[in-house]
Each structure stands twice: as C-alpha cells, then as structure tokens.
Image (cartoon, rainbow, N blue to C red):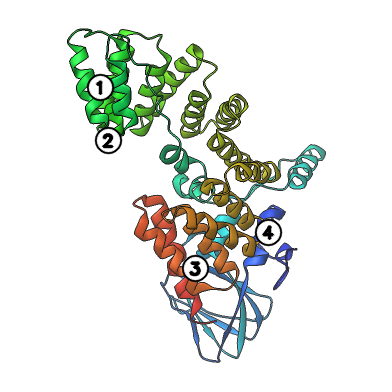
C-alpha cells in the first residue's frame, strides 16, 4: 500500500496537473528536513535541484537585486530548480525553527517518465471531448532524449545488444573436413577451424558456406572486423543463405549500423521463418530503432517457436513494462524464472517494476539477487540506488550510484548517476 506523507500534492502547483501515477510517486518520495533559526537552506547561485514546501516556520528569500520575501507554512519555493535544473535565483534562510517537505529534481524527472494510469487516459479523453475550447498545457523544456529514456529504457535497449545477439552455428561445407572443423569448434579452438577454412578457400573461393563458417570462427576469437568481412563475402556469393544474412546482421548491429542490420535480419526471417534465434535478433534490431510494437512481435514469435528461448520472453516483458503493461511484464519474467531461476535480466526487470510501483523492499530483494548473478549490471545498481533511497538509506544508495560510475562508460547513464549521487550526498546532511 502506498503511504502518503507530507502535504497533498494534488493541491500544489506544479504537481496538480500531473497524471496520478507521477503524483503518487512524488508523494511517496517527499522527505522532511528540519532547520534551526538562522540556518542557510541554499545559497544564491547554487544548483540545489529541489522544490520545498514549508510545513512550519518562516523562510526568507533574498534575491540578487536585494529583493526580499518572507514565506510561511503552506508556501513553496524552488520550482525553477525542480523543473529546469537551474541555479538558485535566491538565497534561502530559515528565520525560525523550520520544517520543509522536499522533492528532488531527480524524482521529478523520473516521475515524468512513468506511464499514466488508464483512468488518467480515459479522464483526459472525456474532458477533451466534452469541451469545445482547446485545452492549454504548460510548456516545459524537454530533457535531452537520451536522458529521458535512460531511466526506463536500459532494461531492454542496453541488454539487447550486450546479452542476446546470436550468431548461428554454420552449416559446414561438404568439401571441408567436417569432422576436423567441427571438432575444433566444439573443443573451443576456433583458431584451428580458421586454419582449415582458410585452406578450403583455395579450392572454393566463392563458397558462401566457407565464408559463413570462417566468419563464425573469427567471431569466436573476437576478430570482429575480419568476421564482418567474411560474412559480407558470404552474402555476396549467395543472398539466399539465411545463416549468412543473420550473421552479417549481428555484426552490423554490434557496430551500431542498425538500419543495415535490420534489412539483413528481415531477409534471414523470410528465408528461414522457423528459426527462433533469427526472430530474437530481428527483435533486437527493431528495438534499437525504437519500433516497440515490431520488436515485441518479433520477440513473441521467437518464444512461440522455441519456448526455451527465455531471453526473447524477458526482452518482450521489458517492452510491456515500457508500454505500461506492468502485470504482463511481471508475469512473463516470473515464467522465465520458473525455467531459469538465475535469469538476471528477469530478476532485474522485476526489481525495476517494484521500484515503479513504490515497493522498495521487494525491489531491493530482486535487484540484489540480479546482482548476485551479474555483479556488473549497471542498470541493476542504478535502480537499487533508487530503491535504497526510498527506504531512507542514502549512504547505501550512494554506494550503488558510485558503482554505476565505476562500471559504465555510457555518458547518459553516468551523467544521471552522478546527478543522483550528488543530490543524495547534498540532501543527506540537513536531515
């Protein structure tokens, strides 16, 4: 059950116009801070990144031009810092014993990413239909798209490219010593397979199967540039080879050439519509270009063909969560965990869902288990930090944000983690 704390945000701008999902989240995230008479709350020009509601006491706001205002219980300050992240346009000082209810900017950004309740959508539609006048909405600056998406999207986007790109095992050409090549691959010696296949190129220099197999052995050795060349050669010699089309798509997608990769996956699916792994890769490519419905359909087709392909179902669940179908997402992740109790993406997904639903205790349990499987999971660390903050454990939350900074070189993630870390440390001291 969501516990309401502090003043009712439905009666306070700028929260009164928010969808109820966002408002409930912010209501749960408000924290109370006490200040002694004469204590500085924030200095002029500092980036406080918070909004304050005065519960009791008197606060003086001193502007740079000498203007002075006295605020009392029920009044607010800091809207510009909250909504736009700007520096404080005033110095705020407690004139008496003062208690503030505070909302952080990071929580504001997060709340504005939450999908609205279905009731909100219905009510908005009804209002718009019943009035002939246009509904005016306050214009607010859009946060950079990468930063807006990073809170909700990494669950699927980042995981797809790093976790489940699948190169198909090649069909070895008949004229090659199949036993020796297959034994080399199965024994973990792709370098030996590469030697055999390079020898066979002398006899069959235009064979799609040879180049597809060669690309596979190079890929296993981490020779991605050479593997890409081999797969391109394979497709050049035979565009009707589904394996070569898929494998070329994987290499292109891993190098962020998403549009080209998508075309090759489409070709591979047309050539071999019964291969679940190709549909999984196709879903990844659609995901990378932001076509969520097409991505979800491809993932769904993958696990319909092969119910054991749990990565496809876990990624499909991530899209359901992104689209507000939280119950479907959670059910899918639980089904995956019945087949693989240590599936880290599903554990992480349940943890993220719990954070969004205001259940930080459950979120901590799921995310800590996900990290026990994959301690390098940056997104799990990030959400664990949010859950720990909700449990009023700022020091532990700061550790998780610091982990994100140490593990990730993605600027969008590290920028957001740094902001959360700074605000956690900054807002901890006055408590």
Disc 3 + disc 2, Cβ < 8 Å: no
Whole-number angstrom distance, CA of label 3 to CA of label 2: 36 Å
Q: Is residue 182 above or below residue 18?
A: above
Whole-number angstrom distance, CA of label 2 to CA of label 4: 48 Å
- Which of discs 3 and 1 lies nearer the camera? The answer is 1
Going 74% across and 47% down the picture, which residue do you hit? 120
Going 58% across and 83% down the picture, which residue do you hit? 59
Graded by Cα atoms within 10 Å as few (under 14), some (14 to 19) or many (20 or more), the crowding at tag 1 reads some
| Residue 229: mark in rendering | 1
Whole-number angstrom distance, CA of label 3 to CA of label 4: 23 Å
- Which of discs 3 and 2 lies nearer the camera? The answer is 2
Return the residue at label 3. 397
Whole-number angstrom distance, CA of label 1 to CA of label 4: 53 Å
Going 41% across and 50% down the picture, which residue do you hit? 412
Quarter residue 378 falls in = bottom left
Whole-number angstrom distance, CA of label 1 to CA of label 2: 13 Å
At which x and y percent is residue 298?
56, 26
Graded by Cα atoms within 10 Å as few (under 14), some (14 to 19) or many (20 or more), the crowding at tag 4 reads many
Return the residue at label 2. 222
Q: Secondary structure at mark 1?
A: helix
Mark 1 or mark 3, which is nearer the start of the sequence?
1
């Amino acid at each position: 059950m969501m516990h309401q704390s502090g003043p009712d945000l439905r009666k306070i701008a700028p929260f009164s116009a928010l969808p109820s999902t966002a408002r409930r989240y912010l209501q749960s995230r408000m924290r109370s801070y006490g200040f002694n008479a004469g204590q500085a709350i924030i200095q002029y020009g500092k980036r406080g990144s918070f909004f304050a509601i005065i519960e009791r006491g008197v606060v003086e706001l001193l502007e740079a031009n000498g203007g002075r205002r006295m605020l009392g219980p029920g009044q607010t300050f800091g809207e510009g810092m909250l909504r736009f992240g700007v520096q404080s346009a005033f110095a705020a000082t407690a004139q008496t014993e003062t208690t503030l209810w505070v909302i952080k900017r990071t929580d504001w950004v997060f709340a504005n990413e939450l999908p609205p309740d279905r009731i909100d959508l219905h009510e908005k539609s009804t209002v718009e239909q019943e009035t002939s006048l246009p509904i005016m909405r306050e214009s607010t600056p859009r946060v950079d798209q990468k930063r807006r998406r990073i809170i909700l999207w990494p669950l699927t986007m980042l995981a797809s490219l790093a976790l489940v790109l699948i190169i198909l095992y090649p069909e070895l050409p008949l004229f090659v010593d199949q036993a020796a090549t297959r034994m080399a691959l199965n024994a973990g010696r792709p370098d030996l397979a590469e030697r055999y296949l390079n020898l066979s190129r002398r006899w069959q220099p235009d064979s799609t199967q040879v180049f597809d197999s060669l690309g596979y052995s190079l890929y296993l050795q981490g020779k991605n540039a050479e593997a890409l060349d081999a797969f391109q050669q394979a497709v050049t010699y035979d565009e009707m080879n589904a394996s070569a089309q898929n494998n070329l798509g994987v290499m292109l997608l891993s190098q962020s050439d998403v549009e080209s990769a998508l075309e090759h996956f489409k070709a591979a699916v047309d050539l071999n519509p019964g291969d679940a792994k190709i549909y999984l890769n196709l879903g990844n490519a659609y995901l990378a270009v932001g076509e969520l419905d097409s991505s979800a359909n491809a993932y769904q087709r993958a696990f319909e063909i092969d119910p054991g392909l749990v990565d496809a179902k876990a990624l499909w669940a991530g899209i359901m969560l992104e689209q507000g179908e939280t119950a479907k997402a959670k059910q899918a992740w639980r089904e995956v965990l019945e087949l693989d109790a240590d599936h880290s993406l599903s554990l992480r997904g349940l943890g993220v869902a719990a954070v969004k639903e205001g259940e930080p205790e459950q979120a901590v349990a799921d995310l800590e288990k996900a990290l026990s499987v994959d301690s390098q999971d940056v997104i799990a660390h990030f959400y664990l930090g949010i859950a720990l903050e909700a449990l009023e454990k700022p020091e532990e939350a700061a550790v998780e944000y610091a982990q994100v900074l140490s593990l990730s070189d993605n600027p969008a993630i590290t920028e957001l983690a740094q902001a959360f870390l700074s605000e956690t440390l900054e807002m901890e001291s006055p408590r």
